[in-house]
Amino acid sequence: MAVEMTLKLERDVISQTAIQAGEPAWMLEHRLAAWEAYERLPLPIWEKSDISKRKWTEFSPKMVKPLDSETMTRLNDLPTGLAPINDEQQPFIFLQDGFAVRSQGAETLPEGVIFTDLATAVREHGSLVQKHFGSVVAFDEHKFLALHTALWRGGVFVYVPRNVAVDVPLQALYAATEVGEGVFPHVLIVAEAGSSVTYVDGYFSTGELKNQLHSSVFEVVVGANATVKVNSIQNFHRSVTNVVTRRAKVMRDGRVEWVFGELSDGFTVGDYKSVLEEQGARGESKTIVVGTGRQHFDMTSSMIHVGRNTDSDMVTRGVMLGRSVGIYRAGTQIEDGAIAASGEQEEKLLMLSPHCRADAIPMLIINENEVNRFGHAASVGQINPDHMYYLQSRGISEMEAKRLIVWGFLDPVLDQIPLEGVRDAVKSLIERKMI
Amino acid sequence: MSQPHLLVQDFRVSIDGSEIVKGLNLEIKGGEVHAIMGPNGTGKSTLASALMGHPRYEVTGGVVTLDGKDLLEMATDERARAGLFLGMQYPAEVPGVSNANFIRTAANARLGEGNEIPVLRFHRELQAKMKALNIDPSFAERYLNEGFSGGEKKRNEILQMTVLKPRIAILDEIDSGLDIDALKVVAQGVNELRSSEMGVLIITHYERLLKYIEPDFVHVMMQGRIVRSGGHELAQELEKRGYDWVKEELGIADETVGAVGK
């Protein structure tokens, strides 16, 4: 039985919130248009994920007040590695429950580079944000995107002017706490022609969240010859319903490199996509998923080849524990006219428990006859007993052998995480999940 | 420490219900090098794998002790920590696990908690040992056996042996797939470890390896048991005359154990 659920929310709340935040009129109009779409659109039907059983409407997106010092998460409580708390020069934004509570290091960046929370950017760099906000992800694609766009709160804006190379990684961290009311961060990254930037962020929840909805959007605009590296880690509590959209649009000879870590314990539907719009564009994505408890994740990574000579590579490693259920789709789509495009994909899921379930689904859609190189490999399996025997035959205990094999399995993706501190933080998160 | 001592008595091993090793007796002491020779399919590799505790093999009878302790009671990793080593014919390729990390983890497991070797010292010693075995230094950081040639895998097995310093080392067809130069390197690696601290069991088809690692005892295995034992001269005789004369003497028509294994 499909039950149509709508939030008890009035348009007025959206208006008041936007006005209170000092947002320009265009953003308010955008929010209201999205809200209309939200009311109009049906719940999306995901083949393998039944959202009707999730209590995602129980949060109340009432008018939010800025956090007081009592509820504010102390910096020292943040996961080290994900938050550069000891280096004030390091560009870093900390957001909690929709508000930027700390920004640092932006003044050290090259001239013209903007790195600020999105609410500030909307006020201070309105025309730049207006030009790109919604240019990669349209809010009427589905109900949750519409809801996100109507209610977005907190988020990050990165702008890199033409030919500027930002050589320190920009970091952000988002905390959702029990005082929060839904999590809707929006990250907008714009890299103009010939520029380069690395952006690293993390999302986590503290305490026992009650049936929260997290619906975040990344929009990445990669100009001609620009390079953008994005590394995003999510670690949400099990009661969080998580609908995530991450998308890049890559122009001529530009390059996007994603590293995703999905370490949450709840329900996640993720849509990760790179549209290789123009000739010579390249997309790479590396994904780690660790399924624990009764986690359900349903992720689709795709590379859409539109331009000629476009090139893509997707690598995924998933480890499944407990009673987790994982569906991982990788789609390489070559549009008519994408002559000499190349695409590789490899998704491997490792099942460490007899009660977990996993599906790896490669999807190859080719609408062009003249493709260059095109490969895929998908596997779901258990630890190879020959590997265990070999390691144990050298005196390594069963537990240690398993650990070595699992870390080895994850290595091709872990190795790609650009910051050592973040890599270590991800490792220790995974380590805790595996115990 | 006392002299290593492996004692195998009336050892019986089955795979999928059919008996491959049928009542085998063998005693190896520190300082001794034994060679088991025999044609394909006589149970030699099954013997080696079963002694190491490979899960595919079922031990159906007999007693095996290492330094007086019941080996068959131990799990594979416990056997290794007790000092047993098997240089494998087909070592597994394990993606994502670096060779050096693997060997260090193994060495530390053998040394026991609290006695771990410092990381830098380990790497220094590993590089020196790799050099002696003519292994390219980059192999330390490569994934375990992945993309190694047959000869490189065998040298990597010997490298592990030199690091782990086992009390009893079994080398299963360590010579297969090696050219003469690699064979010499491998043999030298083994010879350098020869001492009263280690006993060695070499399993091979050919006498070739035994020119470089001279055994004290040579055993011929047929139909799942040792049918003849002697000194090095037995290996030379087998090289010259083949195995048929042994079969004739014993009145054996088919030396193999049956359907499975080799």
Image: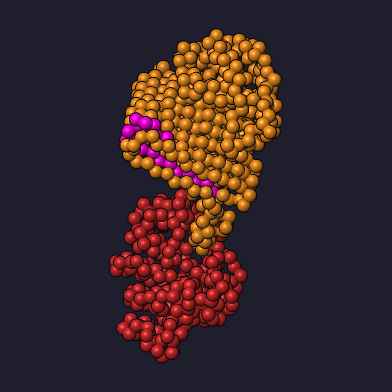
Chain colours: A orange, B red
Q: Quadrant of residue B194?
A: bottom left
Residue sitting at 55 percent across and 77 percent down? B12
In the rendered image, residue A155 lying in the magenta stretch gets the answer: no
Q: Quadrant of residue B112?
A: bottom right
The tally of labels here is 0
Q: Nearer the viewer, residue A94 or A6?
A: A6
Q: Is residue B116 left or right of residue B177?
A: right
Q: Nearer the viewer, residue B140 or A176?
A: A176
Residue sitting at 61 percent across and 39 percent down? A296
Above or below, A271 relative to A382: above
Q: Position of residue A270 (x, y in %)?
A: 54, 33
Residue sitting at 53 percent across and 54 percent down? A383
Q: Is residue B60 left or right of residue B45?
A: right
Q: Position of residue A37 (x, y in %)?
A: 58, 19
Above or below, B170 relative to A82: below
Image quadrant in which the N terminus of chain A is located: top right
Above or below, A140 relative to B239: above
Q: Quadrant of residue A256?
A: top left
